[in-house]
Image: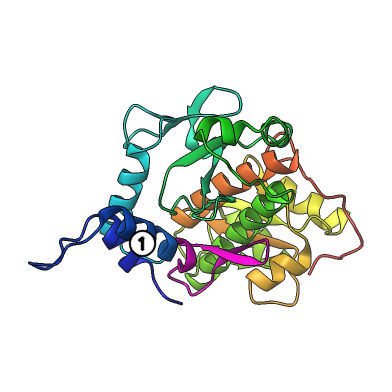
Amino acid sequence: MVGVEGGLGALAGKVPSAGVQVDNDIQDDQATDAAFAAVGDAGGTTEAACIAGAEVVTGVGFGPEAEAEAEAEADAAEAEVIGGGASPLRRCVASGLVQTKTLMVRLVVAPDGHLVPDVAERLPGRGFWVTCDRALFQRAIARKVFAKVARRSVIVDGALLDRTVALLEQRCLDAIGLARRAGQVVAGFEKASEALRRGRLGHTRMPNRLVLAACDGGVHGRQAVAALAGTLPVVDMFDAAALGAALGQERAVHAVMAVGGLAERLLVDAARLAGLKGCSPAWTRCGKPGAVDPE
């Protein structure tokens, strides 16, 4: 996957060689097109959205310095940023409320005029922040809020909300997969139960941070693990097949994740996902217990 360093470097204003005349507006437009067309994440996976037959990809495929520059540039152009680029506060374009961006999702207008979700908050250009509330999101689309705020024609696909939900789901599952590869998660009824009883994963000193439970898991197994979880948040928005795929298994019903950046990222994204799915509060069990038995 081609990275986005080139596009972002041009957006940051590369100086042309002496004697060469460059039209900055054309250069910026080409760089933005390149950034939207070729953004990949460091793990080799992508978050893709198909709009009118075109693929728009989001991800985290550039280094910390370029990432910080792009974020600062985007924040500077966003009227919804409250308190400067370093501030976590954003104004919701749908409700006008100011709150932390961890409760919101960012959308941007692609060069072709389509509004696309930027769940990783990496795409260049001005962002439009919306509170992760399903009814509010739908109302913003119905009232053409994005075109009014952008003061330009904006193409809003009818599947925008569903696409945003799908991208957040994949982002959550990606975080779980990364945690597995980093040794920060254990899966299976026995291993999860042991970790919860000990307060940490296996023989490590990493404290537990959250519990993963398949939404179609067996009732008795889920109740047993929930009892051991105590006050730990339970993320149960995925079925056994999806959890299993993220954890390198055919299926997984119970898992425990340790403290760390991936766990915090998952909690934030799972809360966003719950809001856009219409679940309240974020950690309620969105799926009904099914016939899948504990491992």
Q: How many marks?
A: 1
SS for callout 1: helix
In this rendered view, identify the residue nearer to me: 175 or 166: 166
Q: Is residue 42 magenta?
A: yes
Name the residue rendered at 75%, 63% in the picture.
253
Q: Relative to 83, is 56 above or below?
A: below
* Residue 168 place in picture, x, y as percent: 62, 53
220 left or right, relative to 73: right
- Which amino acid, by three-letter code, is at mark 1? Ala
Q: Is disc 1 surrounded by few (<14), some (14 to 19) or many (20+) residues within 10 Å?
A: many
Range covered by the magenta-colored residues = 36-60
Residue 202 seen: no
Give the color scheme: rainbow, by chain, secondary structure or one colour. rainbow
Q: Which residue lies under the disc numbered 1? A: 31
Report x, y in % for residue 36: 47, 61
On screen, residue 292 versus residue 154, left or right, reads right
Left or right of 68 on screen, residue 238: right
**In which image quadrant can residue 104 be found?**
top right
Q: Can you see residue 126?
A: yes
Quadrant of residue 103 within the rendered picture: top right
What residue do we see at 75% from left, 72% from top? 251
* Depth order, front residue of 82/253: 82
- Residue drawn 34% across the image and 64% down it: 7
In the rendering, at what x and y percent does residue 89 appear?
43, 30
Q: Please indicate whether residue 279 sits to the left or right of residue 255 in the image.
A: right
Q: Residue at x 46, y 58 (%)?
A: 206
Q: Picture quarter containing residue 260?
A: bottom left
